Image: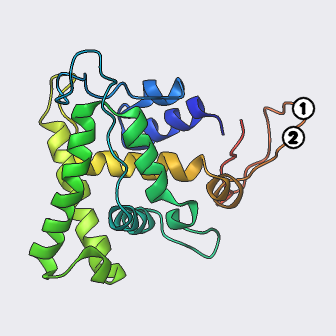
Amino acid sequence: MDRRNAIARVALLMGGTVIGADMFLSSCSSPGKPAAEAGAGAGAPLARMPDLDVDQIRLLDEVGDTILPTTAASPGAKAARIGRFMNVMVRDCYTPADQKIFTDGIVKLSEACNKQYSKSFLACDAAERTALLTALDKEQKEYAAAQPEKGAPSHYFRMMKQLTLLGYFTSEVGATKALRYLPIPGRYDGNVPYKKGDKAWATS
């Protein structure tokens, strides 16, 4: 699946635009903060967001795997190293403002989990993780509905969910296990028989 097709599918699933899509289509890289804002002298190189740490990436792996868990038919998002994908996308394709929303969101998700269960997300079982993320998904939908103006800040969980879908279905695991993939599809056939339950095509 190419980038443009993947972004279109994620936008359809999420009911809106994909954050950082323009940068992703142009192969990134985010310009980062101007040197003056970063506290550097005139003419200094632009500041770049530092990589997320190992614990943050591990948390995002588990968040992604809760959104897209392993099933009998295909591996989950963690198998696609979704935490690393999110790190690269946020670092290279998000604006500084969106980078801050995302990184602050990691803290907010952890705080919400501790408030709800008095333990970390990693210490929660699958049912607790699902319940927490379901509540956060409801929260982000309500937040989006209450932001009529274009260009309003996004909700951090919307970012995490978008990146999980985008990263998984553009990964080798997602394209070949969760979707049907033909590396050399051959001639175009606009009338392929479909049976209920068939996987979508990774190439189209």
The residue shown at (42%, 35%) is: 92
Q: Quadrant of residue 34?
A: top left
Say which of 43 and 15 sits in front: 43
Q: Residue at position x 22%, y 38% from top? A: 154
Q: Quadrant of the C terminus?
A: top right
The residue lying toward the viewer, choosing from 34 and 1, is: 34
Crowding at dot 2, Cα within 10 Å, few <14 / some 14-19 / many 20+, comes out as few
In the figure, is residue 191 to the left or right of 12? right
Q: Is residue 149 visible?
A: yes
**Cα–Cα gap, marks 2 and 1:** 9 Å
Is residue 130 shown above or below 38?
Answer: below
Residue 124 can be seen in this image: no
Secondary element type, mark 2: loop
**Disc 2 designates what residue?**
184
Where is residue 33 drawn, in percent x and y?
26, 27
The amino acid on which the numbered mark 1 sits, given as a three-letter code, is: Arg
Q: Residue at the top extreme?
A: 43
* Image location (x, y in percent) of residue 144: 20, 39
Q: List the residue tagged with mark 1.
A: 187
Find numbered disc 1 in the image and state the secondary structure of the residue it sits on.
Answer: loop
Residue 196: horizontal and vertical position, in percent? 66, 58
Q: Is residue 170 left or right of residue 202?
A: left
Q: Identify which residue is drawn at 15% across, 81% down.
A: 117
Specify whether 16 is left or right of 131: right
Q: Amino acid at mark 2?
A: Ile
